[in-house]
Amino acid sequence: MAGEPVEGTTGSLLATDPATGEEVGPAFGLVDAAQIEAATRAAEAAFDAFRSQSPAERGAFLRRIADNIDEIGAELTARAVRETGLPEARLEGERGRTVGQLRMFADVVEQGDALQARIDPALPDRLPAPRPDLRQAQVPLGPVVVFGASNFPLAFSTAGGDTASALAAGCPVVVKAHNAHPGTAELVGQAVARAVADSGLPGGVFSLLFGGGNEIGQTLAADPRVKAVAFTGSRAGGLALMRTAAARPEPVPVFAEMSSSNPVVILPGALTGDAAEDLARAYVGSLTLGAGQFCTNPGLVLVPATPDGDRFFAAAERLVSEATGQTMLTGPIASARTAGADSLAAEPDVDTVATGSAGPGPNALAPMLLATGLKSFTTRPRLQQEVFGAVGLLVRYPADGQSAEALADALAEALEALEGQLTATLHAGPGSEDDAVVVRRLLPVLERKVGRILFGGWPTGVEVTHAMVHGGPFPATSDPRGTSVGSLAVHRFLRPVAYQSVPDAFLPPALQEANPWGLNRRVDGTVAPAEDRA
Amino acid sequence: MAGEPVEGTTGSLLATDPATGEEVGPAFGLVDAAQIEAATRAAEAAFDAFRSQSPAERGAFLRRIADNIDEIGAELTARAVRETGLPEARLEGERGRTVGQLRMFADVVEQGDALQARIDPALPDRLPAPRPDLRQAQVPLGPVVVFGASNFPLAFSTAGGDTASALAAGCPVVVKAHNAHPGTAELVGQAVARAVADSGLPGGVFSLLFGGGNEIGQTLAADPRVKAVAFTGSRAGGLALMRTAAARPEPVPVFAEMSSSNPVVILPGALTGDAAEDLARAYVGSLTLGAGQFCTNPGLVLVPATPDGDRFFAAAERLVSEATGQTMLTGPIASARTAGADSLAAEPDVDTVATGSAGPGPNALAPMLLATGLKSFTTRPRLQQEVFGAVGLLVRYPADGQSAEALADALAEALEALEGQLTATLHAGPGSEDDAVVVRRLLPVLERKVGRILFGGWPTGVEVTHAMVHGGPFPATSDPRGTSVGSLAVHRFLRPVAYQSVPDAFLPPALQEANPWGLNRRVDGTVAPAEDRA
């Protein structure tokens, strides 16, 4: 906490190996309300020093975190495997993603466009009145609370995307560790704390807290020093944080990434020849990847009730039957998957098509494939509820003997009935004019419903780039104007401040006439590239 | 409504001339719940057609609205004078600001940077896996409800900044007219509706509703088709809308601009020589401008208890005593000013320094000047409550016989105790090293508290430019990441969508390889200016 180890006072927490159910030491002490307040006070106290860093200093700080995480790689992987049941190769890859993400934000900070410097020079001769000099730059919101996610113990947790983007913005961060991987969190937290100290920053720039139950989350979201909340997790958890943050004397934004079924629409033209079998193989691979524990898991696939569609259906049925369950992250997550799948399977007009085999250990549930018809799906909102895990729902739609226009209308109606989603995927035949008619009708619907539209492929890979959007309308997230993956994520934690007639000596460097940080700045509405960039 | 006149069903509304208390015809019919729903349904139905306009088409549409408003200029001014009691010259100026604002947003739309196009090209040879083509652009949120403001019947009402920026984003707009100026609203609404029709757009792009009480506002904010709310008005009104929008099954953002006392800190060095008298004159001018009915009215002035400060104090006292009240916008606003001023004056340690003369008519309240000491102000939050109108509170701070550092600390403590504000203003002596010490200490505090920092001058002029921020932390606004004045305002109504591996033929024009709209686009994180701009 704020660079110093602190002994929790309200009990302790042991990790559980989900592959065996065994407890794993050491014990992590849980904080009390006074300790939470100490962490947010330290974050507040560190804010002005942290936000006044130059782009070069902030970039170096972020790179130091990445280097420190790379240094503990082997130990970190071993601990994370133990706590999450995820395979070693996956965790090695996730560490690469995590440090790559930190270095991307270092690039973004050093490049400086995120400050969005704007200058409208004075017009002393303007009539009827002169225009004053006006300048604008983005400043950080203040201390941010980040909730570690269960399903990405590295990339969406202690030093994951939310933390990296908040630090990149200049916001001190208080992380509430996910109780499923406390040892992993602690290792990463120490790596961050070392980077804070080695950068000469006050310790309050970063704290990592362990706490029991949901109360610590509510306490953090209600803390008056906290100016934004970032969360990845369940819909119930995100909604609770949104309510708390909205009910504060000073409401603050919550960026919660919650719930998505990630519909995939396979159009008739995409299933010709060998494609049906290949697509089914790719689908089941995406559905069962990481035990289906991805926010972008393809929970819904719309497939035509045609001979080609039947081949896809039969192949998917066979492949899921042959699939073996992988260990899920925690016992409660596995229980929730069982309850969610049972509830979906018990709905009228939903058939259980295939059930794979359970894997070894208590939490390696068998993958499942369910099916329903388009009409039931369109009219019954319960059928679009996300089941977190390897449980897929195939929605068969009639496609033979109707025009492309009629098909487009029927599919558009089904997609209109969807809640907001992180992603939607269209598979269309490259040369099919009929498919193109449907695509043109569906794209505007999807643009209103989702954060990312894919053509072909499967949604489970989320690239960390400048154009990525991992976000979307409610309930996919609490604020469709943000993304939690990709460089745009930094903008969630920034707000604009204008400076009117402020003398150069008092202006922040981003806005000084000499442009000491070498920024691209928007002058009178048009970006003027820096003449002399470092 | 949606381009067609509709007869209200639930009673009617007459304007009142606040200068005389007389009712002014004609009567405007008030809508019922079904009519509200019809308006939002029409907005939703118009959304896809409206948002698919090219930048050139959208720009032409906004210019057409401006032209139509210019055309009815004389009639509009006459009606607005009658309904608001504001002087003709002010309303002429406000019309200029309104059409200028529409044309600025036309420039912004045509220039295209607001779409923030981003392209990360595919990397087919990347290892261990290829990177897909990823593209991102901003899309509009959907139908927006705008609440007309009482104090700017043109620039913050029917076709004011919120409407202009929402339309610029591509969002259909439903305006709830302010009941204080229905005739003004109707004239402007017809000008907008003509532009909608002449641009070949569906009528649902714009509707103007008249309604009684607060219920219509809550109904609109709760309407599932509405995707954002923009409001300028009282804190109670803004908070009610925030609550309603947060409690919806699908919560939506509310951009409420509510409450600000706009602190002005006059440092000792700014008061030497003739400056005290000049500053006092400028202060009282800003305080009483438009009967003090500006969001940025300087309600709080911190002034040193020094001989120079006493000269400022005495001059302000004299000038307010000599000032005559102007007609306020409505009877209820005048009553609220009376109640607020009485309540403030009744606080312990608050002295009534000067009271001017009431003007003619029922609502031309006398300007008032109150005073208190720094310690009382710092410790008693009630003293910073905004009184909407020409009521100023002078806060005298001890300045003689203490170091610049001690003064800086005392003032910083007072400013730390403030709620979020739209503006803060510093007056410092140009050559004063002591003042500079204080300024350096206060600037970081102000950056955390306000949306716009001024050096010298007074906050009541809000330029409509690219670098302006008319926003700030709660309760100045409901979302400090926005502004309701200036070109940045359009971003409130946009959200990002990513397109992964989408064939060029299906991409929106902003992201097509040939760049048909000639946009500056960010490629792999760096803005690549369009090679061939139209």
Image: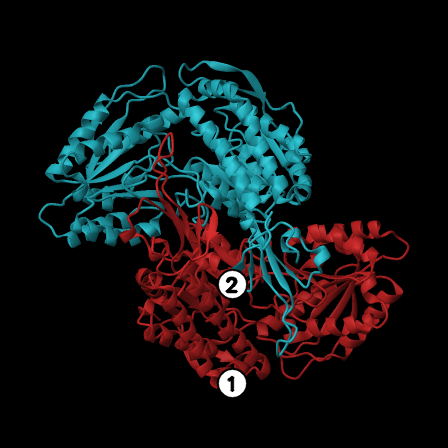
Chain colours: A cyan, B red
Establish if B413 lies above or below B110. above
Element under label 1?
A: helix
Establish if B421 lies above or below B67. above
Provide residue A119's location: percent of width, then percent of height. Answer: 59, 61
Q: Which residue is mark 1?
A: B78
Establish if B155 lies above or below A184. below
CA neighbours of label 1 inside 10 A, class few (<14), some (14 to 19), many (20+): some
Q: CA distance from mark 2 to mark 1?
A: 29 Å
Q: Are marks 2 and 1 in contact (CB under 8 Å)?
A: no
The answer for which chain carries disc 1 is B
Comparing labels 2 and 1, the label whose residue is closer to the camera: 2
The answer for which chain carries disc 2 is B
Callout 2 amino acid: Ser
Provide residue A501's location: percent of width, then percent of height. Answer: 68, 64
Q: Tag on residue B487?
A: 2
Establish if A18 lies above or below B155. above
**Location of residue A123 (image quadrant):** bottom right
* Residue plotted at (49% across, 69% down): B104
**Location of residue A129 (image quadrant):** bottom right
Closer to the N terminus: mark 2 or mark 1? 1
Q: Give a yes or no on whether discs 2 and 1 share a subunit.
A: yes
- Out of B166 and B148, give the one closest to the viewer: B166
* Residue plotted at (36% across, 65% down): B36
Q: How many marks?
A: 2
* Residue plotted at (48% across, 17% down): A78
Element under label 2?
A: helix
